[in-house]
Amino acid sequence: MISTPLLRAMRKASLAATTALMIGAAVAPSFVTPALAQGPESVANLAEGLLGAVVNISTSQTVKGSGGGEDENAVPMPQLPEGSPFQDFFDEFFKKNREGQDNGGSQKVQSLGSGFVVDAEKGIVVTNNHVIADADEIEVNFSDGSKLKAELVGTDTKTDIAVLKVDPKAKKLTAVKFGDSDKMRIGDWVMAIGNPFGLGGTVTVGIISARNRDINSGPYDDFIQTDAAINRGNSGGPLFNMEGEVIGINTAIISPSGGSIGIGFSIPAEIAVGVVNQLAEFGETRRGWLGVRIQPVTDDIAESLGMATAKGALIAGIIKGGPVDKGQILPGDVVIKFDGRDVVEMRDLPRVVAESPVGKAVDVVIVRKGVEQTVKVTLGRLEDGEKLAEGEAAKPEEDADKGAEVAAASVLGMTIGELNADTRAKFGIAAEVSGAVVTAVAKDSAAAERGIVAGEVITEIAQESVSTPKEVMDRIAALKEQGRKNALLMLASKTGELRFVTIRMD
């Protein structure tokens, strides 16, 4: 028999448990409603202060008409719903684009993009080069409906950046400033603002999806990838951080339809600032230049050079008359650090060199024959170097190997011959090229897999010069005795351009 005090205690405990369950049921929903369900904080105040600095860029270009009626390649007029508010705009836009087609005369072709003001006092506007390319007239349209004619100050095709200038006295301008794109991390919120079709500012929000993207659009690819919607007409517009600073210039999208699928690319401010400042000041870029040809360091090449890991940029050739033509850097060297900045991949080197001032003396850390060392280099100007490289051509000279006996050897799937007057003439090899010539390559051989073809010249094997078929064979045999699995060959083309390849020797 249960005592009365014990029964009361049990009833009290049961009542407490029931009350706790009821309270738990009442408050349970609050535990399954995360704070993020309410969405990110509104960007309305931020967008309101930035819209005035983002502009629409309208260009026109006069081209010859086809003379045969409507151009079959012309973009078709979009089918809009009856009574669409955009009907009048598109009617006018496509009418202007097709003027002159029926009579065979010249026609005005219009294009639209976005841009933004970076200097209100000087009237400096930034956009993409492809937005204004080949334009006869450029007009900047502001969010309040006002318009100003623009003058092209300078362009840079390598980064797809253009700088325009409008009259700052004709209108009070609102400017935005560049921020530090290096501080941005994957997952940070960003806001893209564009002014497509001149309809007014369009604001989209997303995050940084990736960094350091290489989309093969130029030598300095280092794009910020974002899922903030970027559509046609947004090219040249700014990508903002949440402090209202421009950390990118919206440039490209990946899309099968032409609309945003959440993959957009922006030029980081780190690259854009220097280009914009140079274009605004000089009307052209003034980049540093090292005067070398480079290629990637693969795992095989790293192994052949005695490097623990594949990193850096492999020097494949030196341009005559360039900053390092006096032997500071040699073919076969691997640049792993430039002016204190690590060179992890081949594509890192052109960018860090280009960002350096012309005439600056810098320390370059290289790996030469497995030994790390530092050399001092004074940079030239890239724009001058490009002209020098274009004019660099082999000049025929009298061959010194006349009368030499032709010898041949077979190694690694290649037939190697003497480089003399006969083989130079047969393959059209320049007189300044030296080494042992590849006269044939066996099908499905290791050499064929590496793209080696007859007429190329082996100048070095494992960073040791070779000039005869016998030296080629001896060098390969020596590497095998050392237990090497790959042979690193420096090959010269018929005109003397160098490249490195590795061939498996097993």
Image (cartoon, rainbow, N blue to C red):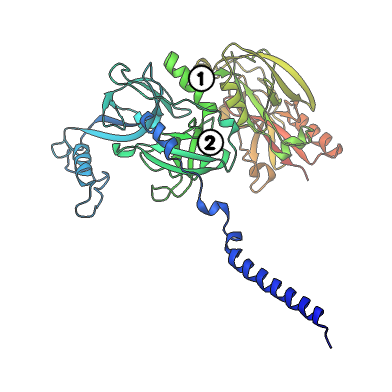
**Residue 77 in picture, x, y percent from top left:** 24, 48
Give the distance between the C-alpha atoms of the residues marked 1 and 2, in whole angstroms. Answer: 24 Å
Badge 1 amino acid: Glu
Residue 74: x and y, percent? 26, 43
Compared with residue 121, is residue 495 higher up or lower down, i.e. above or below? below
The answer to whether 66 appears left or right of 144 in the picture is: left
Nearest the eye: 357 or 200: 200
The residue carrying mark 2 is 223
Task: Count up the numbered dots.
Answer: 2
Give residue 298's mark: none
Say if residue 109 shows up in the picture: yes
Vertical placement of residue 355 versus 103, above or below: above
Residue 480, image x and y in percent? 83, 39
Residue at the disc numbered 1: 386
Dots 1, 2 in contact, CB < 8 A: no
Q: Which amino acid lies under the numbered mark 2 shown in the image of this protein?
A: Phe
| Residue closest to the far front | 4
Q: Position of residue 148 (x, y in %)?
A: 27, 24
At label 2, counting other C-alpha atoms closer than 10 Å, the crowd grade (few under 14, some 14-19, many 20 or more) is many
| Residue at horizontal 31 percent and vertical 30 percent from the top | 142
Location of residue 378 by image quarter: top right
Determine whether 482 is above or below 385 in the image.
Answer: below
